[in-house]
Image (cartoon, rainbow, N blue to C red):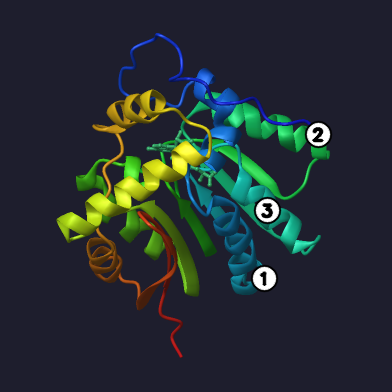
Amino acid sequence: MKEPPRDRLYAGDMLPGDFVFDEKVAAVFEDMIHRSVPGYTTIIAMTARLAEKNFQPGSRIYDLGCSLGAASLAVARRMQGRPCEIVAVDNSRPMLDGLEKKLAALGGGPVQCRQEDIRDCAVEIASVVILNFTLQFIPPADRAPLLRRIHDGMMPGGILILSEKIVLGDARLNELYIEMYHQFKQDMGYSEMEISRKRAALEKVLLPETLAVHKARLAEAGFESAEQWFQCFNFASMVARKRDGR
Ligand code: GEK
């Protein structure tokens, strides 16, 4: 298969402003996210497994902040033709154009795209909600109401998969994890200049929190339990479950 175009956005002379999900980012996003999120391939594969195991017939699967739809497409493949409805939501038109192109190449399937702000999008009869690396871009004050709405739109026993860049409570360990992360990016072929420019561009846009803050907010939103199932340095994924009434 053809290699996706390589992310060289911060390799040139251009001084970056705040990071936005525009055409330039969408065009290289596949390469960017694989080289920028340690464990991304595992997270997508396990998201699909979790979705398949927890899907309830007649319900919906939501992928909020779907970008090019990696999770939605992996879930669709994993469902192997079982009837299901996968709702992929993003507010970036260039990202959804990319996903729509992929869907057209597949000749259809269970994924429907919606261009919407996830803070406004209706979540209904959901047994699985995927929120992979997107809550971190939502203004902190809007995060609790969003999680509450997601919770309320879920079926009893439904799960939320939440993946995020995180910070650690301990400043020294936090520094170490960031160093290890920058090493990972260098190992993936990014130069020190690209790493520092990207960091500056994300500074006011991507606001990470500790796992403790995430877990407390999930509990406040009504989830019965939330556990972390994956972590590689400052990237983690959690699964939260809505009470199933048993
Ligand atoms: C993946 N989940 O490949 N409403 C809708 N979409 C939004 C909003 C918003 N308010 N804010 C940001 N986005 C994907 C990766 S990327 C993560 C998710 C990253 C969208 C934004 O347009 C982008 O497509 C996505 O959230 C975040 O598993 O780039 O680090």
167, 138: nearer the viewer: 167
Determine the image quadrant of residue 227.
bottom left
Q: Mark 1 points at which residue?
A: 57
- Classify the position of ligand 1 by quadrant: top left, top right, bottom left or bottom right: top left
Q: Which marked residue is nearer to the observer: mark 1 or mark 2?
A: 2
Q: Crowdedness of circle 3 by 10 Å Cα count: few (<14), some, many (20+)? A: some
Q: Distance between the residues labelled 1 and 2?
A: 27 Å
Q: Crowdedness of circle 1 by 10 Å Cα count: few (<14), some, many (20+)? A: few
Secondary structure under badge 2?
helix
Secondary structure under badge 3?
helix
Q: Distance between the residues labelled 3 and 1?
A: 18 Å
Task: Describe residue 21's horizontal placement relative to residue 224 as left or right.
Answer: right
- Whether the residue carrying mark 2 lies under 8 Å from ligand 1 is answered with no
Q: Mark 2 points at which residue?
A: 105
Q: In the rendered structure, find residue 74 and report the number of the disc placed on it.
A: 3
**Residue 181 visible in image:** yes
Q: Residue at x 56, y 42 (%)?
A: 34
Q: What amino acid is labelled 2 in the image?
A: Ala
Q: Which of marks 3 and 2 is nearer the N terminus?
A: 3
9, 83: nearer the viewer: 9
Q: Is residue 150 above or below residue 90?
A: below
